[in-house]
Amino acid sequence: MSNLDSAVLRDKVAGALYGQALGDAFGMPGELWGKKRARKFFGGLITELIDGPDENDVAFNYEKGQFTDDTGQALVLLDSVASANYEPDARDIAKRMLEWADRENAFENNILGPTTKLALADFREGRDASGTTDKALSNGSAMRIGPIGAMLSPDKKEKLVDYVYDVTRATHTSDVTIAGAAMIAEGVASAIVNDDFGKVLDDILAVEPIGYDKGAETCSPRLAERVKLGVGFAHQYPGQDEEFLQKVYDVVGTGVPIIESVPAAITVAYYAQDPNRSAFLCANMGGDTDTIGAMATAICGAFTGAQAIKAGYRDLLNRQNDVNFDSYIDIIMKGRNILK
């Protein structure tokens, strides 16, 4: 799948996983708050990993450096596919997601996204969830897909979309949610093997129509068109973080709908091209900051490798989360060999 030296390849895979967790944890404190409210509450910019405030209906569940459901569910996906020799099993994924939700008291603590919450409730009750999953417009499919993308080849785009669909269909089967997830997975896959972010962006845009063809039709704008708007702002405001973030917030959008959050994440990844900067920018843009941070920073971490992430961040992520990151890196590396 790649001609990279094995140590470099492992570092880039680790960068995708740590990047996912870092962007998630950095964006957690102000998640789902508007930009003005967040700036006023935090007295300016969030510059470090901090506790979720009691005033935030979702973030109060988390301490500094802890990742949220975005990364928690990403690990559920990895556990499931690894248990099935990397052949996705939608029922097993749904079962594990429900078990994870119960462990986290996710239903009671308002942690789950709107579509995943409904789909898992359907699964628990033995109901057909397609009425929910085919109409999905939220970003649950994409928020957790980055580490899956780290197992896949960016050059085999149809195979990548098929795999993304199979690990996503328990909760999301609509065209825009499959396309959005495929774009994030492709971004991570491409960032691992390419050292030119222009090529990464080309790969992301090229996979979008394949994703749309795979899912159930919805009435939604096109993701690629929103990405092109965002990239235009990245070129228009180089080095002008505030002006850039405001344009993304005002025009691309930073909310829970996948048509906003995925283009916002790809736009920030293109603008930052560094995981530390990506996590910082996403945390301070307002909106669904943890999810946008997870997606954007997974791509940037895959691009630079884990060694580019500040050691203090990686240490805190390891201390604050009951997760063996190395074991999940092993799962991804084995998946790369099996799925190549």
Image: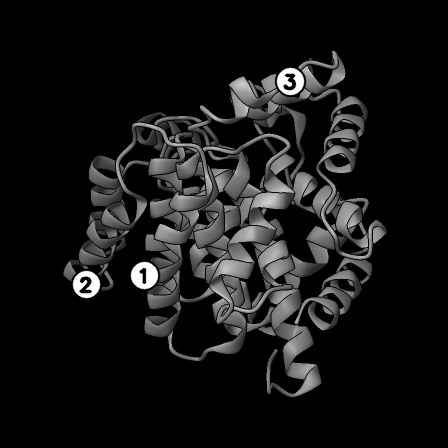
State the SS at label 1. helix
Q: Do tag 3 and tag 1 residues touch (Cβ < 8 Å)?
A: no
What residue type is disc 1 on?
A: Tyr
Res. 69 image quadrant: top right
Residue 128 tag number = 3
State the SS at label 2. helix
x 29%, y 36%: residue: 253
How crowded pointer 1 is (Cα within 10 Å; few <14, some 14-19, many 20+) is rated as many
State the SS at label 3. loop
- How far apart marks 3 and 1 lie (CA) works out to 41 Å
How crowded pointer 3 is (Cα within 10 Å; few <14, some 14-19, many 20+) is rated as few
What residue type is disc 3 on?
A: Asp
Above or below 285: residue 318: below
x 43%, y 59%: residue: 277
Residue 185 location, x and y as percent?
52, 56
x 82%, y 57%: residue: 85
Here the colouring is: one colour
| Residue named by callout 1 | 271
Res. 232 image quadrant: bottom left
Above or below 117: residue 197: below
Residue 199 tag number = none
- Dot 2 or dot 3: first in sequence order is 3
Residue 266 or 320: which is nearer the viewer? 266
Res 234 seen here: yes
x 85%, y 50%: residue: 83
**Viewer-nearest of labels 3 and 1?**
3
| Residue named by callout 2 | 235
Res 275 seen here: no
Above or below 250: residue 219: above
